[in-house]
Amino acid sequence: MTPLAAALRMLAREEYEQGRGALRRLVGRSPDDAVAWAYLSGAELAMADVDAARAALQHALALDPDGFAPRLKAGELALRLGDLQTAETQFVAALRAVEPGTAQAEAARRALVMVRTRLRGAIAHGATLPRIGSPIAWVRRRWNALEEVH
C-alpha cells in the first residue's frame, strides 16, 4: 500500500488526526504531489482548520490547476463553506479532468448534480441555503474504493 493510500484509508476510517499527520509527512517528502496536497486540504478541514485547508488546497491547485483531486477537493471545500457557485465550477472542472465512465467521473458527476439541485432550490425559494454537513462522504468513499483497486 502506498503512503497516500494508507493516509486515505485513515481518513476513510475517520482517523482524521492520524491521516492528517500521514499526509503532512507525505507532502514533506514529496512537495510536488498535488494529490497529497489536495487530500491534506480535506484532512485539515476535517480537523476544523479552515485556513490550513485553504492553504493546502491553494498549493495543490498551483501544482496541478487542472487535476481531478485538486478540483474535486476545491469543490468540496466550497460546498462545505456554503459557496455553491464555486463548488459547481470546481466540480465541473473535476469532471472534465477525467475520462467519462470512470469512478472518478461518477463521483464528480454526483457531486455536481447535488450542487445544481441545491442551487435550483435556492433560486426557486429565493433563500440562501444553510451550510450543509458532509454529503461529500459519498465522494470520499468512492475515491477511497478507487484507490484500493489501484
Image (cartoon, rainbow, N blue to C red):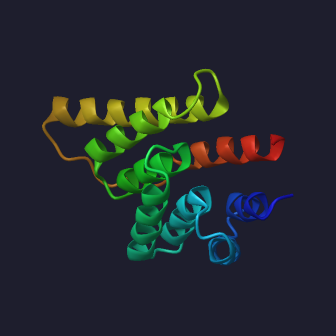
Name of the residue lying farthest toward the right: 1
In the image, what residue occupies the spot 40% across and 63% down?
58
Q: Quadrant of the N terminus?
A: bottom right
Measured as percent of width and height from the top left, residue 61 is found at: 44, 56
- What is the quadrant of residue 145 in the picture? top right
Which one is nearer the viewer's eye here, 57 or 80?
A: 57
Viewed as shown, does residue 132 lie left or right of 82?
right
Residue 75 % position (x, y): 41, 48
- Image x and y of residue 5, in percent: 76, 57
The total number of labels drawn is: 0
Examine the rendered structure and indicate whether residue 32 appears above or below residue 24: above
Residue visible at 34% across and 31% down? 116
Q: Kindly give the residue lying farthest to the left in the view shown.
A: 126
- Provide residue 30's location: percent of width, then percent of height: 66, 69
- At a point 68% along the width and 78% down the height, the residue shown is 25
Q: Residue at x 64, y 77 (%)?
A: 28
Residue 124, image quadrant: top left
